[in-house]
Image (spheres, helix red, strand yellow):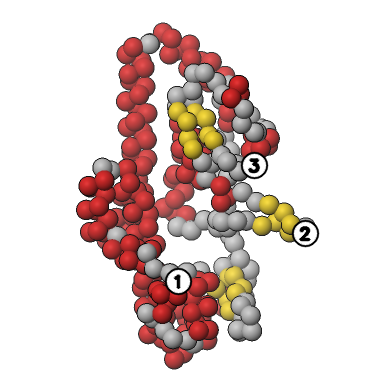
């Protein structure tokens, strides 16, 4: 296992370790101080497990102060995937949480909306690195219902029957088939821009580093600020460098070809 993957795995598991340690510590304190009372609350919470409630209106419930229970343990601001995951994780331990969201529907960038008969996703439209992320999803899933995933994309001849391609069409540029895997991306880009092989290779190298470092950078926020700074500077330098640049600035360092810049913007 190479170093970036190992670092990503470690940084991905840190929130899980922290949440479990936090929950265990909290439960031990509650048990020590309120053993009998806690048992009663535990039984009551188990009978009202929100995972047993099949109610789509949960995503649309508007805030009103009298709806908020007086005995909640934590308030989570924001109903994006991070906030919902944390709330679901705490709920597994019968810890009462309230998730607040300023939008009219919960989900953050994971919600959908319809316009003109079409459904749109404002942010996330697929899940990458599933072997690494799946354990986190399984942690908060209903144990009686396994999570299933559909392969995104369509199929072209080069895929040999696998559903692994996405069509990319930008203006009058040639239709491109974006296939799974960095080697396939390199091949497709080089086929359309043979004279920009070096720029394409640099772009892929930057993206490969940055995608691991972005997760590490976010995870380091659980540490004190002085430690955040040290670890981020040591391990996330590529991400920090390009996160502070505009797309034009970042791609301008790689190529002068405007058509390639447009395509790389879609890839990145």
Disc 2 on helix, strand or loop? loop
Which quarter of the image is occupied by the N terminus?
bottom left
The correct choice, above or below, for 251 with respect to 99 in the image is below
Instruction: Report which quarter residue 22 is drawn in.
Output: top left
* Residue 120 can be seen in this image: yes
Q: Residues within 10 Å of mark 3 (few under 14, many from 20)?
A: few
Instruction: Please tell me whether mark 1 sits on a helix, a strand or a loop.
Output: helix
**Residue position for label 1:** 247
Give the residue at mark 2.
Answer: 116
Indicate the quadrant where residue 247 lies: bottom left
Q: Which residue is mark 3?
A: 104
- Within 10 Å of disc 2 (Cα), the crowding (few <14, some 14-19, many 20+) is few
Q: Is residue 103 left or right of residue 74?
A: right
- At horizontal 70% and vertical 56% (from top left) the residue drawn is 119
Question: 40 left or right of 118?
Answer: left
CA distance for labels 2 and 1: 31 Å
Say above or below: 63 vs 148.
above
Please tell me in which quadrant of the rendered image residue 131 appears. Answer: bottom left
245 is higher (above) or lower (below) than 136? below
């Amino acid at each position: 296992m190479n170093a970036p993957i190992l670092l990503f795995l470690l940084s991905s598991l840190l929130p899980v370790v922290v949440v479990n340690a936090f929950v265990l510590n909290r439960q031990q304190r509650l048990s020590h101080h309120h053993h009998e009372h806690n048992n009663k609350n535990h039984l009551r919470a188990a009978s009202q497990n929100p995972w047993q409630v099949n109610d789509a209106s949960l995503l649309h419930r508007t805030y009103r102060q009298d709806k908020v229970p007086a005995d909640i343990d934590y308030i989570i601001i924001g109903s994006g995937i991070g906030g919902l995951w944390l709330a679901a994780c705490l709920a597994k331990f019968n810890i009462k949480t309230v998730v607040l969201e300023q939008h009219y529907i919960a989900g953050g960038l994971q919600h959908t909306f319809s316009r003109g008969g079409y459904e749109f996703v404002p942010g996330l439209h697929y899940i990458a690195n599933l072997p690494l992320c799946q354990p986190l999803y399984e942690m908060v899933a209903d144990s009686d219902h396994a999570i299933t995933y559909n392969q995104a994309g369509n199929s072209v001849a080069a895929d040999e029957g696998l559903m692994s391609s996405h069509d990319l069409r930008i203006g009058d540029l040639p239709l491109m088939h974006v296939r799974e895997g960095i080697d396939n991306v390199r091949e497709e880009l080089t086929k359309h821009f043979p004279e920009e092989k070096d720029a394409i290779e640099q772009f892929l190298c930057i993206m490969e580093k940055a995608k691991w470092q972005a997760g590490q950078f976010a995870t380091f926020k659980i540490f004190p600020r002085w430690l955040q700074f040290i670890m981020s500077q040591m391990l996330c330098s590529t991400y920090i460098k390009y996160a502070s640049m505009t797309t034009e600035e970042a791609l301008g360092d790689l190529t002068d070809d405007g058509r390639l810049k447009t395509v790389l913007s879609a890839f990145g």
